[in-house]
Amino acid sequence: MAQKTEIIVAVLNGPNLNLLGEREPEVYGSASLAEIERATQESARALGVKCSWVQTNHEGQFVDAIQSLKGKADGALINAAAFTHTSLAVRDALLAVRVPFVEVHLSNIFAREPERRRSLLADLAVGVVTGFGADSYRLGLEGLDALLVTSRPTIRYLTGFSGSAGVAVATRGALLLVTDFRYDEQARQQSGAVARVEIEGVSVWDRLFKELGGSTQAGNLIGFEAHALTVKEAERLSSPVASAWRWKPAAELVERLRVRKDPGEVAAIRAAGKLAAEALRETLAAVRPGQTELAIAGVLEGALRRHGSEAHPFPTIVASGPRSALPHAHTSPRTVAAGEWLLLDFGAVVDGYCADVTRTVVVGARADDSQRALYTLVQEAQQRARAGVRAGMSGREADALARDPIEARGFGAAFGHSTGHGVGLEVHEAPRLARTSADPLPENAVVTIEPGVYVAGRGGVRIEDDVHLSADGPVLLTDGCTDLVELV
Ligand code: DQA
């Protein structure tokens, strides 16, 4: 939306939006309408825009509010809520008044029930912002003309392209991917159906700016991923050639969409979880006292590859004996002795999607009583969180499912990391299951559940599985076989 001073934008909110905050927080987020209004007013002030704000549950009043815009507002942000899908009266009012408006929705209506995927208003709108939660209002107001995407997982998410070099731009209704000659065939194959692919022999960035000149206008506002740009790339945005556009750091917009996995994404993570289990089974059958951590990691990584993992999403952790008390140990040349813990934290990748698994076993002997007690404590905490975690629960509540029983037994200080994190195209992504996270866990997120207790000098136990937060509750995507394994 244009950004001169004196611009007046009316924000109209339809039925049930007065209940935001308490109403289906897993779909609409935890912010109340008053909080969204405050944030929107703040963004409006920064843009030099004046905002009026209306909410009504009544169709007639909504129609009256639209009619009253004539001559009074330069534009409108409209979240017609359920009227979006049903109301010809609202459509007729917009047709009559002809005020430019942006349709906004907190949830992504196109990823919801069939009856919500249809908007009776969208074809009359300047644009539609749907699925960015409370941020949809701010984005509607800012009206980014394009988003420059530089982070590899997000490029992959939007275009399918899995190469290691390239930049993408999403303009309204079009995607552009610029990469170099090494990826010519691959990029066309992976992205040709959804994006315009340009191959550049000299400078991908110069080419990007050239192409942008054709698909945007001078002065357009282009968002960039502030969290995913190197200093060098940021310098390119302040170069003379880039000064044709206005550049604006954008929040983690696409990451927020990536949190909610569709069935294909869930299936890929499940496939990665399945092959991870097979690789682990094969590896444990070959583990003997006297082997080094590095040798065991080699066997595991080989098995992961043989079973079809595309990559190792992070350096495999194999930590033995007292080193298992280092939550993120580097695999070392240390030799594993009989009766010691062996902690294996590893991942598998299928179609770009990661599974993340940790198992802790005892090598070459039966577990002693203190090992068994420690293991049972972590296992019970993990089971409790795995079974109890739900979409809509805050990250803090989910974390507490595993933390409470560990704290109750006096081991709180020995569990110093969070209970879990999102997993998908990246092995660590949103959301977080942590004491510090008040955000609700979105439906269809996939998260790890990985409590651990670490006793310096003696060793530690961590158990990790991946869980899909489906509408019907948590669904395990890894094998969930956590009974204590004693390799005797
Ligand atoms: C909504 C989506 C509508 O389908 C629903 O009826 C609403 C809210 C949204 O903002 O996501 O009430 O407009």
Image (tube, rainbow, N blue to C red):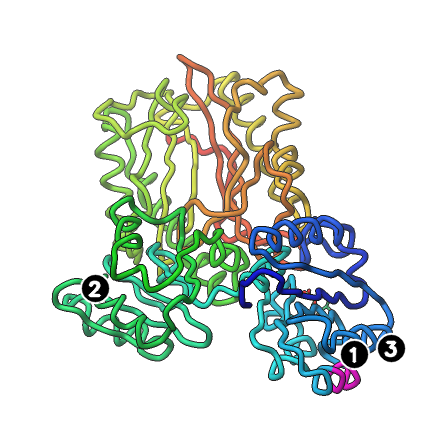
Tell me which amino acid carries mark 3.
Gly
Predominant secondary structure in magenta? helix
Q: Check disc 1 and report its element: helix, strand or loop.
A: helix
Tell me which amino acid carries mark 1.
Gln
* Residue 158 % position (x, y): 40, 66
Judge whether 136 appears above or below 60 on screen: above
* Residue furthest to the top: 457
In space, the residues marked 1 and 2 are separated at their CA atoms by 47 Å
Q: Quadrant of residue 393?
A: top right
Kindly identify the residue that appears in the image at 53 percent across and 22 percent down.
Answer: 374
Q: Residues within 10 Å of mark 2 (few under 14, many from 20)?
A: some
- The quadrant of the rendering that contains the N terminus is bottom right
Q: Quadrant of residue 408?
A: top right
In space, the residues marked 2 and 3 are separated at their CA atoms by 53 Å
Q: Say whether residue 122 is left or right of residue 346.
A: right
Q: Nearer the viewer, residue 110 or 62?
A: 62
Whether residue 92 is in magenta: the answer is yes
Q: Check disc 3 and report its element: helix, strand or loop.
A: helix
Query: Do callouts 1 and 2 mark residues in contact (Cβ within 8 Å)?
Result: no
Q: Residues within 10 Å of mark 1 (few under 14, many from 20)?
A: some
| Label 2 or label 3, whichever comes before in sequence order | 3
Q: Nearer the viewer, residue 400 or 177?
A: 177
Q: Which residue is mark 1?
A: 67
Kindly identify the residue that appears in the image at 83 percent across and 66 percent down.
Answer: 56
Q: Which mark is residue 206?
A: 2
Q: Nearer the viewer, mark 1 or mark 2?
A: 1
Report the label total. 3
Q: Nearer the viewer, mark 1 or mark 3?
A: 1
* Residue 280 % position (x, y): 36, 44
Q: Which residues are magenta?
A: 87-93
* Residue 225 % position (x, y): 40, 53
Q: Which mark is residue 60?
A: 3
